[in-house]
């Protein structure tokens, strides 16, 4: 059986970030045949990823931001094995799309574990880690890093006409894959640091409106107001080693249970709406 080839596609206008991301993937995939494709003049992420997919030759594509750091040396093996059962994988996502933000369905419907760096402090956010290590029945994933069978990515493609900027390309791509009958999953056991928490301004709101116009008739009923940010446990670390020590199923489960209890207490104490 031939070893699958990885094609890593990174859209980046920052040479230093691109070099750092490329070096990270070269180290992770040192034992796997791979190629790294840089798109440095993308008109949008949808257009850039479509162009990268056309240039790619691998069996597996990794569509990656230039500001993530993956800390799992078994990354390549895990993704190879899991894409035998899944079509598209991510690190965070939702099992219920109700709007133009993947996390709006809230607690119980959002899944994954992601660390975000703020200066020298790392914030570990866990949204839901069961079943471990891969949550299935996912409808859409966050686009900081998406891993897919190349045939699936080419079949679904990115809607660069509707999403002609840098927002909602990921939600549209992954939700379109789910609507097409593809199997999506969220990997919880691969430590990853994202250097950004995302920007949710007026531009994002416009593309969320476009997403709803395109897909809104397929949403389930919305029983809650949209969230300002993903809800999850928040624990701060000063370096990689303590972060890796905490990135374990039992620890994350206990932290999630404690956070759910805290959340329930806070809501039970909140004044009733008038």
Image: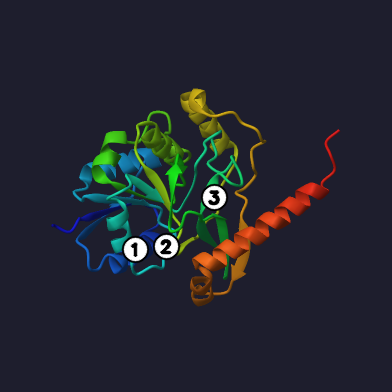
Q: What distance separates the C-alpha of mark 1 from that of mark 2? A: 7 Å
Q: In which quarter of the image is the N terminus?
A: bottom left
Residue found at x 25% / y 68%: 30
Q: Callout 3: 10 Å neighbours few (<14), some, many (20+)?
A: few
Q: Secondary structure under badge 3?
A: loop
Q: Mark 2 points at which residue?
A: 190
Q: Residue 96, how many percent across, how many down?
A: 52, 38
In the rendered image, residue 231, in percent from the top left (x then y), is placed at 62, 51
Q: What element carries label 1?
A: helix
Q: Which of marks 2 and 3 is nearer the N terminus?
A: 2
> Does residue 147 lie above or below 213 as drawn?
below
SS under mark 2: loop
The quadrant of the picture occupied by the C terminus is top right
Could you tell me how far apart the alpha carbons at marks 2 and 3 are, in whole angstroms?
A: 20 Å
Label 2 neighbour load within 10 Å: few <14, some 14-19, many 20+ = many
Q: Residue 135 at what x, y percent from top left?
A: 45, 51
- Depth check, front residue: 31 or 178: 178
Q: First in sequence: mark 3 or mark 1? A: 1
**Coloration mode:** rainbow
- 136 sits to left or right of 9: right
Compared to residue 253, the image places residue 47 above or below, namely: above
The residue at which mark 1 appears reads as 75
Neighbours of disc 1 within 10 Å: few (<14), some (14-19), many (20+): some
Task: Look at 47% across and 38% down and name the residue there.
Answer: 168
* Residue 109, picture quadrant: top right
């Amino acid at each position: 059986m031939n070893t699958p080839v990885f094609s890593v596609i990174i859209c980046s206008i920052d040479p230093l970030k691109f070099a750092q991301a490329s070096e990270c993937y070269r180290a992770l995939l040192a034992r796997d045949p791979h190629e790294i494709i840089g798109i440095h003049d993308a008109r949008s992420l949808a257009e850039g990823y479509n162009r990268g997919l056309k240039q790619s030759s691998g069996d597996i594509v990794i569509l990656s931001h230039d500001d993530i750091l993956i800390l799992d040396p078994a990354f390549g093996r895990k993704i190879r094995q899991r894409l035998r059962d899944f079509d598209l994988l991510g690190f965070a996502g939702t099992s219920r799309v109700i709007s133009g933000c993947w996390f709006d369905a809230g607690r119980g419907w959002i899944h994954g574990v992601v660390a975000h760096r703020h200066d020298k402090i790392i914030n570990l956010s866990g949204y839901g880690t069961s079943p471990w290590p891969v949550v299935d029945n996912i409808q859409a994933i966050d686009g900081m890093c998406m891993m897919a069978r190349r045939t699936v990515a080419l079949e679904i493609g990115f809607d660069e006409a509707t999403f002609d900027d840098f927002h909602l390309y990921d939600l549209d791509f992954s939700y379109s894959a789910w609507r097409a009958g593809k199997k999506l999953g969220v990997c919880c056991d691969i430590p990853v640091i994202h250097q950004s928490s995302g920007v949710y301004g007026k531009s994002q709101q416009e593309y969320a409106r476009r997403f709803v116009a395109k897909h809104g008739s397929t949403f389930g009923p919305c029983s809650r107001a949209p969230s300002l940010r993903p809800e999850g446990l928040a624990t701060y670390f000063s370096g990689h080693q303590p972060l890796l020590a905490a990135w374990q199923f039992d620890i994350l489960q206990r932290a999630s249970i404690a956070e759910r209890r805290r959340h329930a207490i806070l809501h039970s104490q909140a004044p009733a709406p008038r």
